[in-house]
Image (cartoon, helix red, strand yellow):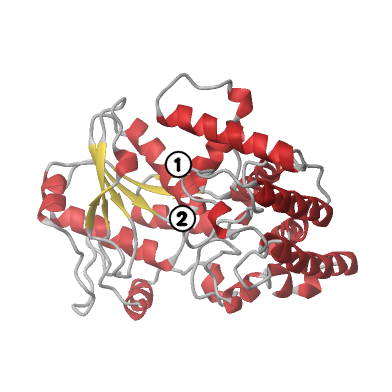
Amino acid sequence: MAWNTSNTFIGPAHFPPVETTPLIDELIAAHAPVAIGVSGGKDSDVAAFETLAALERAGHKGPRVLIHSDLGRIEHTDSRPACERLATRLGIELVVVKRKAGDLMDRWLVRWQHNLERYRQLQCVKMILPWSTPAMRFCTSELKTAVICRDLVERFQGCTILSVVGLRRQESATRAPQVKLQNATFGTTGYSWHPILAWSREDVLAYHRFHGFPLHEAYTTYGLSRVSCAFCMLAGRDDLAASATDPRSHDIYREMVELEIVSTFSFQSGRWLGDVAPHLLSSEMLARLKEAKQKVEARERAEARIPRHLHYVKGWPTVMPTRAEAALLSEVRRSMAEIMHLTIEYSEPKTILDRYAELMAMHASRNKGQKRLPASLYPMQQELWNTL
């Protein structure tokens, strides 16, 4: 094996060096706690190996953990076992955390129910999709970053924490403050550390081979190019189709397609998950999926009638509709209710104008720091302002 007694990797010279900065070096020398985020994927494996080797070379004596956020039934079956194999190989504790309010599929389902209620209560003028998107990655921010950082600030109170992420792309600074590790109650601060930014995919695969450390079965058995969720909103069609070949992913696949059907929003922009592996769906689901696609066209035609200045912007609503615009919104909302089989409030022009006045008054009160109106009037609106 290419390890010495202190677990320091003695590898070939062609592997890129670990990237640090003077600040990271100072924190290592000060024995700051180091938490290495792991997913079971090849990049986080290498980041873990190389980070620990760098810490050994630097004489680091501070606490170290691997930390994995379990996203629930959307995860590949082998992800947690892969992290456990890594922890065993490295002889380091693996911390597994989860979102207390439910897994990622639960988050999408609850978000959809909230979005329906927003529409019913005229807290938005267009229907809002249930899914996370490349521009709105709450799947990462809420179910990974926030959950991991919450554990770390409680675990390492009063410390400056180094949070290691196995990124390879030149999309982030090697050293950057991690705001979710800054916690006044627990007295923590922290920084993200991306030690393998310069590594290529070929470097990572060669490292695994040299090392004899097994890759996640998603790569070796099912042929995926990356490991994230079993069905990821960033995945290409080939990876989605490859995930669908794992029988253990069939239940979550059908559950996700069901949400596509009831919401009329495709999982990815321009790509329906239901089209990836239609052979896994019943004839009844296929018929309903076809109907959902037809509803999309009707929904988009209806919503296209809404004047752009009435669309959502930060602080919505910012303008009162005219009487003619209220009449148009009434027509659109009635059409949407029919398309989506919804019972809605504020379907008449007058009630729409009254609702806009109410919402604008609540927003003005909020901006002026005045005493808020009763919470029963705007819980969903507040969430809308915070999440869109």
- x then y, percent, for residue 184: 28, 28
- The quadrant the N terminus occupies is bottom left
Viewer-proximal residue, 16 or 291?
291
Tell me the mark number nearer the camera, choosing from 1 and 2.
1
Which residue is at 15% across, 45% downward? 27
Going from N to C along the chain, the mark reached first, 1 or 2, is 2
- x then y, percent, for residue 376: 63, 24
Q: Is residue 301 left or right of residue 45?
A: right
Q: Is residue 323 above or below residue 74?
A: above
Crowding near the residue tagged with mark 1, few <14, some 14–19, many ≥20 C-alpha atoms within 10 Å: many
* Marks 1 and 2, how far apart at CA: 17 Å
Can residue 341 be seen here? The reply is yes
Which residue is at 28% across, 29% downward? 157
Viewer-proximal residue, 345 or 137?
345
Q: Quadrant of residue 183?
A: top left
- x then y, percent, for residue 147: 45, 41
Which residue is at 30% across, 43% downward? 179
| Residues at marks 1 and 2 touching, judged by CB atoms closer than 8 Å | no
Viewer-proximal residue, 304 or 292?
304
Tag 2, which secondary structure?
A: helix
Which residue is at 38% across, 52% downward? 37
Residue assigned mark 2: 83
**Which amino acid type corresponds to the residue marked 2 in the rendered image?**
Cys
- x then y, percent, for residue 270: 62, 73
Q: Is residue 66 left or right of residue 238?
A: left
**Which amino acid type corresponds to the residue marked 1 in the rendered image?**
Val
Residue assigned mark 1: 147
Tag 1, which secondary structure?
A: helix
Q: Is residue 232 above or below residue 347?
A: below
Can residue 7 be seen here? The reply is no
